[in-house]
């Protein structure tokens, strides 16, 4: 099986300026996702799609394939991940070789492990190459969520969830953005990574599903690394 890993990394970022090349734990954020894909047998190449020359150089030096700068129309705030993925996939299959799957690893999830990626690939194989999507336990349960209407509040989901204790709530999960794996055929047909037949790859370790989107998320990621380094130092 041949799987193309795609890492999407625009140069611009409104919440955290230059986020993808900002240093986390001694290396640019994007390198975490490039490095984790190395040494996985099913992955034939790791391609970085970016519109930024500095991201391009950093990604190339880290061992990724960066054959071009992304077209301007795919580098806007409104450009979808699916459109960017299709652009990269079409180029790769035309210029290189057909692949069995496209694995999207967003650089904002630096702590996903190689073991989790291998597990996701195994699920892809076991379930006849149905789309596999990373999910994590929901931080806020939908039965406890509210919506504001006409100066008041209403239940976001109808039912008696507000009266349930946390331990009595049914498990709820959210897509965490850390792992998407799909066949080229399904991506082109659906123009989406999501489908009713998708298989969940459950991230049980909160660290792995961390998505860095704000400065607070960055502080959390940095604190995790400092705590882990402190534990290692104390054990020596």
Image (spheres, rainbow, N blue to C red):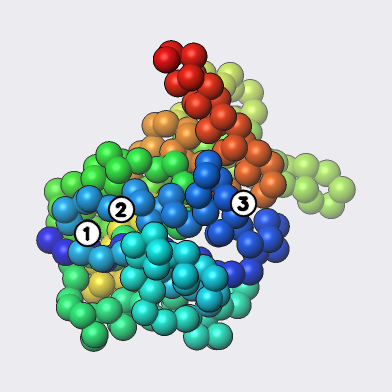
The mark that comes first in sequence, 2 or 1, is 2
Circle 3 residue: 213
Other-residue count near label 1 (Cα within 10 Å), few / some / many at <14 / 14–19 / ≥20: some
Q: Position of residue 138 (x, y in %)?
A: 52, 37
Q: What residue appears at the point 26 percent right and 66 percent down from the top-left corner?
A: 45
Question: Do we see residue 195 in this rendering?
Answer: no
- Is 115 situated left or right of 97 in this image? right
Disc 2: which residue: 37
Frontmost residue, 235 versus 114:
235
Q: CA distance from mark 2 to mark 1?
A: 7 Å
Q: Please give the count of numbered marks on the rendered protein.
A: 3
User: Would you say the residues marked 2 and 1 are in contact, meaning their CB atoms lie under 8 Å apart?
Assistant: yes
Q: Nearer the viewer, residue 70 or 119?
A: 70
Q: Position of residue 203 (x, y in %)?
A: 39, 37
Task: Name the image quarter holding residue 194.
Answer: bottom left
Dot 2 crowding, Cα within 10 Å, few <14, some 14–19, many 20+: many
Which residue carries the number 1 mark?
Answer: 43
Q: Quadrant of the N terminus?
A: bottom left
Residue plotted at (30% across, 53% down): 37
- Residue ID at (18%, 47%): 122
How far across and down, in percent of the image, does residue 211 sit?
54, 47
Q: Tag 3: Cα neighbours inside 10 Å, few (<14), some, or many (≥20)?
A: some
Residue 30 in percent (x, y) is at: 48, 57
The earlier-in-sequence mark between 3 and 2 is 2
Give the vertical position of 231 relative to 120 (above or below).
Answer: above
């Amino acid at each position: 099986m041949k799987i193309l890993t795609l890492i999407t990394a625009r140069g611009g970022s409104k919440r955290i300026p230059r986020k993808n090349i900002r240093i986390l734990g001694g290396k640019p954020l994007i390198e975490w996702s490039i490095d984790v894909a190395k040494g996985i047998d099913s992955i034939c190449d790791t391609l970085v799609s970016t519109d930024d020359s500095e991201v391009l150089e950093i990604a190339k030096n880290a061992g990724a394939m960066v054959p071009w700068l992304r077209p301007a129309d795919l580098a806007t705030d409104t450009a979808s991940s699916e459109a960017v993925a299709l652009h990269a996939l079409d180029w790769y299959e035309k210029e290189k070789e057909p692949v069995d799957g496209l694995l999207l690893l967003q650089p904002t999830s630096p702590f996903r492990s190689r073991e989790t990626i291998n597990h996701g690939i195994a699920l892809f194989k076991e379930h006849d190459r149905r789309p596999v999507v990373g999910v994590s336990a929901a931080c806020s349960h939908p039965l406890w969520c509210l919506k504001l209407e006409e100066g008041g509040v209403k239940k976001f989901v109808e039912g008696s969830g507000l009266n349930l204790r946390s331990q009595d709530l049914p498990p709820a999960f959210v897509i965490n953005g850390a792992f998407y794996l799909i066949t080229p055929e399904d991506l082109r047909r659906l123009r989406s990574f999501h489908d009713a037949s998708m298989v969940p790859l459950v991230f049980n370790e909160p660290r792995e599903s961390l998505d860095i989107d704000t400065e607070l998320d960055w502080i959390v990621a940095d604190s995790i690394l400092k705590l882990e380094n402190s534990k290692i130092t104390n054990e020596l």
